[in-house]
Image (cartoon, rainbow, N blue to C red):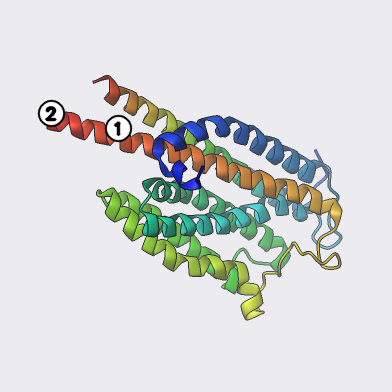
Amino acid sequence: MPDLGKYAGDVLLAYGFGLTLIAGIVALSIWQSWRAKQKLEQAERK
Amino acid sequence: MSIWEYANPHRFMALTARILPVLAVLSAAFLLTGLIWGFFFTPDDFKQGSTIKIIYLHVPAAFAAINAWIMMLVASIIWFIRRHPVSALTARAAAPVGIAMTLIALATGAIWGKPMWGTYWAWDPRLTSFLILFVFYIGYVALWEAIENPEVAADLTSVLCLVGSVFALLSRYAVNLWNQGLHQGATLSLDKETNIDNTFFVPLLLCLAGFTLLFLTLVLLRTRTHIRLRRASALIARQARA
């Protein structure tokens, strides 16, 4: 871990927020893709 | 082969199935390398201290947020002119990714602003136009969700996209146009004297490439999702009529 000095809280907060949002939009996109695939397969089976 | 042949959903699905895994691996590689390099292996700035490390999230996210809207604008114009549903769905797919990027840029900018400017927020031309762009993103997604007829939704959201483009461009050029406010000018420049030092520039370039590749990956994945959902809705409607 690098020494972030007196700004450690700000830098870690920015990284925590940014990386959480990136992970969130990736997870949401994958989940929605999986759900759409299931819905289409179900419709095609009928 | 013409590029317009990929406006056919079957061709688009076949092509993107092949290129998506490659794009995903490349975006993860560029993003992880850039962020790890920037966070762990770059020195502090003589003025800004360790807060300079926020640049590896803030600048690429802002770059992606503006370019996402420009990409939506191009897709919307294609929809208006050629009426290709894939172009309208691509614009729709890009919007939530644009929201995430705008939010990252706004939040990291506010966090960076507090120790450097003494405030989280100021009604500065660039910050304000960026906030308006964020509101346009929300409105764009809400409009798609609110209208049932996909053709009408594509038409109206395309008009909204045209109007919002003013703020996408303003948020990029606000500093040059008004020449006032707290936000600095462009971080990257072709002029070696004004461009940031290579120590910070190389990992920043990797992050810019990583965010751009991630944006492309997510847009393609989400466009495939919308194509599948539209196909499923058409099948369900046909079964209901039979």
Residue B140 point in image, percent of width and height:
39, 57
Q: Amino acid at mark 2?
A: Ala
Q: Is residue A1 above or below residue A9?
A: above
Q: Label 1: chain? A: B
Identify which residue, A22 or B222, lies in the foreground: B222
Q: Is residue B156 above or below residue B222?
A: below
Secondary element at image label 2 = loop
Measure how far apart labels 1 and 2 are at the Cα level. 15 Å
| Nearer-N-terminus badge (1/2) | 1
User: Which label is found at residue B196?
Assistant: none
Answer with the quarter of the image where residue B189 lies.
bottom right
Residue B190 point in image, percent of width and height:
79, 64
Q: Would you name the residue on which mark 2 appears?
A: B242
- Whether tag 1 and tag 2 are in contact, CB under 8 A, the answer is no
Q: Would you name the residue on which mark 1 appears?
A: B232
- Graded by Cα atoms within 10 Å as few (under 14), some (14 to 19) or many (20 or more), the crowding at tag 1 reads many
Give the left or right position of residue B92, taking residue B121 as reference. left
Q: Which residue is pictured at 36% across the width and 47% down the height?
A: B85
Identify which residue, A42 or B128, lies in the foreground: A42
Q: Label 2: chain? A: B
Q: Which residue is pictured at 12% across the width and 28% down the height?
A: B242
